[in-house]
Amino acid sequence: MVSFTSLLAVLAATTSAVVASPLELLKERGIQPGTGTHNGYFYSFWTDGKGSIDYTNGPGGSYKSKWNNVNNWVGGKGWNPGPPRKVAYNGTWDNYKVNSYLSLYGWTTNPLVEYYIVEAYGTYNPSSGTTKLKTLEDDGGTYDIYRTRRVNQPSIQGTATFDQYWSVRQQKRVGGVIDVKKHMDAWQASGLKLGSWNYMIMATEGYQSSGSSEINIREA
């Protein structure tokens, strides 16, 4: 797996003269820029190129990440395509004092939707400032359902405008079982339409922060 810690340092001299992201520079050099399969699982990571990130795929559905002074990055392991299933996960994610999320994260197309089932978050609740649509119970916890909209932002289809759907767990945790169909049924009952399945990963995300995680997933 590519280590952004060393790679960004090597590319730093070239970026001042070129208007291109580090991921675009990786593509030019024939290096897979953050998606693929490993030990039977799909993996993905994305970064806006600021700060440093070490992301390493481990055995089975496991991965490790460590980031320093990033603006925004997200990555993890899962499935592609990612239709509803029960997902079991465990590991370490001790980022409660920084801006970070641990989420089951993915996309649909037609309509283009970015979705999060947030299991834990740090200093910022990603649903802040939005209107709660309803709640649901899953695996002994309560999740609040929200919708937000992103305008002309990066997506799996390039720069686009799309909705984000959120289930944010009130009782933060790192480990358990997520019944994805239960969440998606609740979203659709709230008028939040979903399209064709794209990828689904158990993701670590960091925003303007430094932190680390070590996560393992499997289908329950």
Image (spheres, helix red, strand yellow):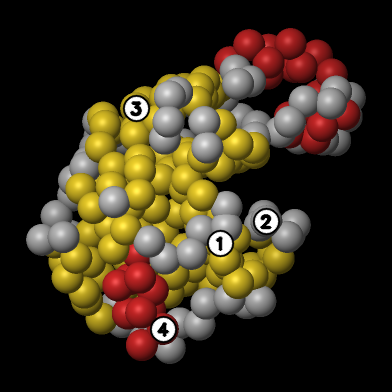
Q: Earlier in the sequence, mark 2 or mark 4?
A: 2
Q: Residue at x 64, y 37 (%)?
A: 36
Query: What residue sits right under mark 4 in the picture?
Result: 188
Q: Which mark is residue 38?
A: none
Q: What residue type is labelled 3?
A: Glu
How far apart are the two marked residues, 1 and 3, measured between alpha carbons?
A: 23 Å
For label 1, the SS is strand
Q: Residue at x 50, y 25 (%)?
A: 57
Instruction: Please state which of residues 132 and 76 is positioned toward the viewer in this rendering.
Output: 76
How far apart are the two marked residues, 4 and 1, measured between alpha carbons?
A: 15 Å
Q: What residue type is labelled 1?
A: Trp
Q: Residue at x 42, y 31 (%)?
A: 60
Which class describes the residues within 10 Å of circle 2: few (<14), some (14-19), or many (20+)?
Answer: some
Query: What residue sits right under mark 3 in the picture?
Result: 214
Q: Do the residues labelled 2 and 1 touch (CB within 8 Å)?
A: yes
Q: Earlier in the sequence, mark 3 or mark 2?
A: 2
For label 2, the SS is loop
Q: What residue type is labelled 2?
A: Ile
For label 3, the SS is strand
The image shows residue 76 at horizontal and vertical percentages of: 47, 39
Query: What residue sits right under mark 1 in the picture?
Result: 107
Q: Do the residues labelled 2 and 4 touch (CB within 8 Å)?
A: no
Viewer can see residue 71: no
How far apart are the two marked residues, 2 and 4, measured between alpha carbons?
A: 22 Å
For label 4, the SS is helix
Q: Quadrant of the N terminus?
A: top right
Which of the 4 image quadrants contains residue 99?
Answer: top left
| 208 relative to 112, above or below | above
How far apart are the two marked residues, 2 and 1, measured between alpha carbons?
A: 8 Å
Q: Earlier in the sequence, mark 4 or mark 1?
A: 1
